[in-house]
Image (cartoon, helix red, strand yellow):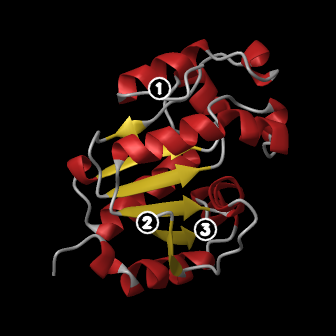
Amino acid sequence: MKNEWTTLEDVEKDILDCTACPLSETVINKVVRKGSDEPKVLFIGEAPGKNEDDTGVPFCGRAGKILDELIEYMGLESSEWAVINTIKCRPPNNRNPNKKELDCCKPFLTRQIQLLDPNLIVLLGNTAEKAFCSGHKMEWGAVEMLEGKNVLKIFHPAALIYTKSRTEDQHRFLDENRHLWKNE
């Protein structure tokens, strides 16, 4: 693994070649990203699930449909967003990634963020916050300037599947911060 990647393709090649943690031994497909190479908004999810592991595409299952609805609610065009995960391989039984796994993928996450260079980073849930913020806790719906970027923490789309009542709060979080991605 290189410490410095100059292009997204360099990072993605090393992600596909990575064997730094035991997850690489059980993965079907590593999940790198989807969306624009120059997004205004970068969504960071937790980890691939079964559908993602089967296809290699992030957020392609039920949670992906919810994320698609949120992107539509935000009024983002396909050229304005991208999505990545904190780790690139599916943990067994969809468990949360552990610290070692998050640490192994952190260089990939950091460099993807740098190369994608979004105006806004949207952390989808607590695991994304843990991976990106390194111990710093954010409030739901709050925006903070971290590492030179506006960062917004919202509910992971999967949480909205199981607790539909959070959808109204999620929309409020987005409405209150719409100025961060819209030129209005």
The residue where tag 1 is placed is: 11
Q: Residue at x 58, y 31 (%)?
A: 52
Label for residue 137? none
Q: Residue at x 37, y 41 (%)?
A: 115
| Three-letter amino acid code of the residue under disc 3 | Phe
Q: Residue at x 49, y 57 (%)?
A: 66
Please tell me how crowded label 2 is: few (under 14), some (14-19), or many (20+) other residues with Cα within 10 Å. few
SS class, disc 2: loop
- Say if 14 sits above or below 37 in the image: above
Q: Is residue 179 left or right of residue 104?
A: left
The residue where tag 2 is placed is: 148
Disc nearer the start of the sequence (1/2): 1
Q: Residue at x 52, y 24 (%)?
A: 56
| Three-letter amino acid code of the residue under disc 2 | Gly
Q: Nearer the viewer, residue 108 or 165?
A: 108
Q: Position of residue 9 (x, y in %)?
A: 37, 22
Q: Is residue 15 left or right of residue 46?
A: left
The residues tagged by marks 3 and 2 sit, at their Cα atoms, a distance apart of 22 Å
The residues tagged by marks 1 and 2 sit, at their Cα atoms, a distance apart of 21 Å
SS class, disc 3: loop
